[in-house]
Image: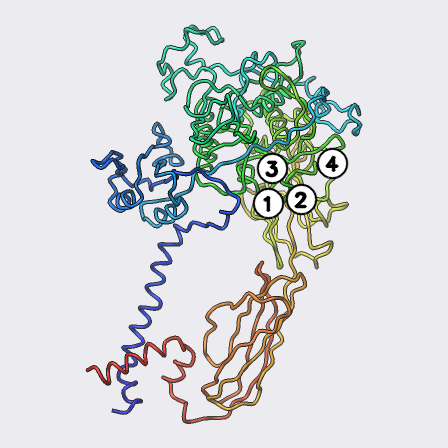
């Protein structure tokens, strides 16, 4: 039997087998792995606890924790228990054992030997079909930069130029207090290093858990501590809040770091400083004024002072503190900490708190970068940057389109532990300023929704001086507190700091009970000098398409700002903004190579495109002879000559065509090259044509033919 006849006989079988092995199997494994991918690109410079990791199981997975005879812990899930034995899991603890919320259900902390390779364990458990996610127990930092302690004036509330800054570069607090000073029914949770709850300028505003206040006198008495969970919330004698810190790492001398308990006292000072900014007792002839005079401070201790002096938080403690605050009546949670990791456990806790109606405020960070710091970077959180006494961006403050607003954060004078006061700097200080404003707004209008409060704060700001985007402006309490209703103006977060090269669908929300109409504008730069109308409409939109924009050629580095303005019947204007980069597409590839050739001969063709922004490029190549393009090839440097070999197996005239795209998916026009190939009968067979287009199949087919010839 000659080779051609043999190929005709076995070719259909080969193709079926090869199709199944090279297509079906990868697609199945791809579907499985795509939902369990765990990215380790962030590992460098990200800290996490040794000897433990977090696992969230699927809702339908039945987890039954018990200790086996060999001292290891078992879940009742066979595939997980095999891993538990392999990795010597010595303890498993359910993090929210009193919760059935879909955000918090089936989340456990696994303990393993201290010298374990946690990242490899995370990979192993992530591949199990019973698992939603696995993550190390990450460590976050507070967002503060301590400064000289001898500044005793609060320019942030009322700037008269007393620190050499610009007069009225403040939040207009005294003007706001003429309208509202705060209400004790509004609870601001300081999710931090604890609170010096007996500080003379804070003690009158410290939250008292009425369910544990046995005689109902509104103060903490020794008789309130009876070692009983009187209110049934899962925490014994939590009359002042809760201390969630239980680190196994060294702590600063004198710190309380090992056992979770009912004493959320601050040993670092950070949480106490933030508490005074938000709601120090005011008009009491003592110390300082808080933004909100009478709002109540709930102490949630999730951070501690490390031997280095830094304030540290562990992921499981932070999540537990968020849930506690949401379950125990917090209206606002102030979070002056973060890291650059998208953490699924923290995100679950954030989503849960938001689902309970809590308004979440967090620090943008002190790294002078546009990289998102979390939890501020989550959509449901108000992200706060820092300004100085001239309404300029603080040099340390993070920035970016994901930031909502700015607030004073340089040399902010406030309470400190051990009944003292100091001036500190950081977005940590800006965050409780915004949280205090949220408290004022809710004191006057407790029925406002989370998005109404966020919209009011974003829409009532003063201008800032900054080359980077730090939100719509610096908050103005006086303008914000005047609103008793508001239309909603929300741009989709996918627009934030995104790269575009073609028409843009601008999605968002423009509505409200008193809605009249909305307009969408664009301007050049992060704080444009002028605005150009894109579109306007009197039809309200909820989480939909506001307009479609065909942008102009990029100018000013390609940075543009989109501005959504919403008007209501009271003449109020709400707004939101998004900063984006308009990316220019690469040039069409220039194709060169043999244009008059011979069938069956391999030729080399070159492809070259340039990108106006200097971005790396990928190429899509169609040979024009029926061989399909498999994938984009690259990346290659802009202007780099890329070569590819190809053999035309049939006669005729063909058009080689190619597109280039940059790393942000801006795609070029098609480049083309016409080639002519005369007929070559010796190779004009369908089988050879197929193998020419699919060369990766040839070795497998060759091996099968050899087996048929010599092994049958």
Residue 142 vertical placement versus 671 (above, below) = above
Q: Mark 3 — residue?
A: 364
Query: Which residue lies at the image location 35% right of the left edge and 14% below the top edge?
Result: 228
Residue 356 vertical placement versus 232 (above, below) = below
Distance between the alpha carbons at the discs numbered 3 and 4: 16 Å
Residues under numbered marks 1 and 2 in contact, where contact means CB atoms less than 8 Å apart:
no
Q: Mark 2 — residue?
A: 563
Secondary structure at badge 4 equals: loop
The mark nearer the N terminus, 2 or 3, is 3
Mark 2 vs mark 3: in front: 3
Q: Mark 1 — residue?
A: 371
Distance between the alpha carbons at the discs numbered 1 and 3: 9 Å
The mark nearer the N terminus, 1 or 3, is 3
Number of other residues with Cα within 10 Å of mark 3, as a class: few under 14, some 14 to 19, many 20 or more: many
The mark nearer the N terminus, 1 or 2, is 1
Which numbered tag is attached to residue 41? none
Q: As rendered, which of 413 and 113 lies closer to the eye?
A: 113
The mark nearer the N terminus, 1 or 4, is 1
Secondary structure at badge 3 equals: loop
Q: How many marks?
A: 4
Number of other residues with Cα within 10 Å of mark 1, as a class: few under 14, some 14 to 19, many 20 or more: some
Residue 435 horizontal/vertical position (percent): 59, 27
Residue 488 horizontal/vertical position (percent): 60, 36
The mark nearer the N terminus, 2 or 4, is 4
Q: Mark 4 — residue?
A: 392
Q: As rendered, which of 543 and 146 lies closer to the eye?
A: 146
Query: Which residue lies at the image location 53% right of the left edge and 21% below the top edge?
Result: 266
Distance between the alpha carbons at the discs numbered 2 and 4: 21 Å
Residue 683, quarter of the rendered image: bottom left
Distance between the alpha carbons at the discs numbered 1 and 4: 20 Å
């Amino acid at each position: 039997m000659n080779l051609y006849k043999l190929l005709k006989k076995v070719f259909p079988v080969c193709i079926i087998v090869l199709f199944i092995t090279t297509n079906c199997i990868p697609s199945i494994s791809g579907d499985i792995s795509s939902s369990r991918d765990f990215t380790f690109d962030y590992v460098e410079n990200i800290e996490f606890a040794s000897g433990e990791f977090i696992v969230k199981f699927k809702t339908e997975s039945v987890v039954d924790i018990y200790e086996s005879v060999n001292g290891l812990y078992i879940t009742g899930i066979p595939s997980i228990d095999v891993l538990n034995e392999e990795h010597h899991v010595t303890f498993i603890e359910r993090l929210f054992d009193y919760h059935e919320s879909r955000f918090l259900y089936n989340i456990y902390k696994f303990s393993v030997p201290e010298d374990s390779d946690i990242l490899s364990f995370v990979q192993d458990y992530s591949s199990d079909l019973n698992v939603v996610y696995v993550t190390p127990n990450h460590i976050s930092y507070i967002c503060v930069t301590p400064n000289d302690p001898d500044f005793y004036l609060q320019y942030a509330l009322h700037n008269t130029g007393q620190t050499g800054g610009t007069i009225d570069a403040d939040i207009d607090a005294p003007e706001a207090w003429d309208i509202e000073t705060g209400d004790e029914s509004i609870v601001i949770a300081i999710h931090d290093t604890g609170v010096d709850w007996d500080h003379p300028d804070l003690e009158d505003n410290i939250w008292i858990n009425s369910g544990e206040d046995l005689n109902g006198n509104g103060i903490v008495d020794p008789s309130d501590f009876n070692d009983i969970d009187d209110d049934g919330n899962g925490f014994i004698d939590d009359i002042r809040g809760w201390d969630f810190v239980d680190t196994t790492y060294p702590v600063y001398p004198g710190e309380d770091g090992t056992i979770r308990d009912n004493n959320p006292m601050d040993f670092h000072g950070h949480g106490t400083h933030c508490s005074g900014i938000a709601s120090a007792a005011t008009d009491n002839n003592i110390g300082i004024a808080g933004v909100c005079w009478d709002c109540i401070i709930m102490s949630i201790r999730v951070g501690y002072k490390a031997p280095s002096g830094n304030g540290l938080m562990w992921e499981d403690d932070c999540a537990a503190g968020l849930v506690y605050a949401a379950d125990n009546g917090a209206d606002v949670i102030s979070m002056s900490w973060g890291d650059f990791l998208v953490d699924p456990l923290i995100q679950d806790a954030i989503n849960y708190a938001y689902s309970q109606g809590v308004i979440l405020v967090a620090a943008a960070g002190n790294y002078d970068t546009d990289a998102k710091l979390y939890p501020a970077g989550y959509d449901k959180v108000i992200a706060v940057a820092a300004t100085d006494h001239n309404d300029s961006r603080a040099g340390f403050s993070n920035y970016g389109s994901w930031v909502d607003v700015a607030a004073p954060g340089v040399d902010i004078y406030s309470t400190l532990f051990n009944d003292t006061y100091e001036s500190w700097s950081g977005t940590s200080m800006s965050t409780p300023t915004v949280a205090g404003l949220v408290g004022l707004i809710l004191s006057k209008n407790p029925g406002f929704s989370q998005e109404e409060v966020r919209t009011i704060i974003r829409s009532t700001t003063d201008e800032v001086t900054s080359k980077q985007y730090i939100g719509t402006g610096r908050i103005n309490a006086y303008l914000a507190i005047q609103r008793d209703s508001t239309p909603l103006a929300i741009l989709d977060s996918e627009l934030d700091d995104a790269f575009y090269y073609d028409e843009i669908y601008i999605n968002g929300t423009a509505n409200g009970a008193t809605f009249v109409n909305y307009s969408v504008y664009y301007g050049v730069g992060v704080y444009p000098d002028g605005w150009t109308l894109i579109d306007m409409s009197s039809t309200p939109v909820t989480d939909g398409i506001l307009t479609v924009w065909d942008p102009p050629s990029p100018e000013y580095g390609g940075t543009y700002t989109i501005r959504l303005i919403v008007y209501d019947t009271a003449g109020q204007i709400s707004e939101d903004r998004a900063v984006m980069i308009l990316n220019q597409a690469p040039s069409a590839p220039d194709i060169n190579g043999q244009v008059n050739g011979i069938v069956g001969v391999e030729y080399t063709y070159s492809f070259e495109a340039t990108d106006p922004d200097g971005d790396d490029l990928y190429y899509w190549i169609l040979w024009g002879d029926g061989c399909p393009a498999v994938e984009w090839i690259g990346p290659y440097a802009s202007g780099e000559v890329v070569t590819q070999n190809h053999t035309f197996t049939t006669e005729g005239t063909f058009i080689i065509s190619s597109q280039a795209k940059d790393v942000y998916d801006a795609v070029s026009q098609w480049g083309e090259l016409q080639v002519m190939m005369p007929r070559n009968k010796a190779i004009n067979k369908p089988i050879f044509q197929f193998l020419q287009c699919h060369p990766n199949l040839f070795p497998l087919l060759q091996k099968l033919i050899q087996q048929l010839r010599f092994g049958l």
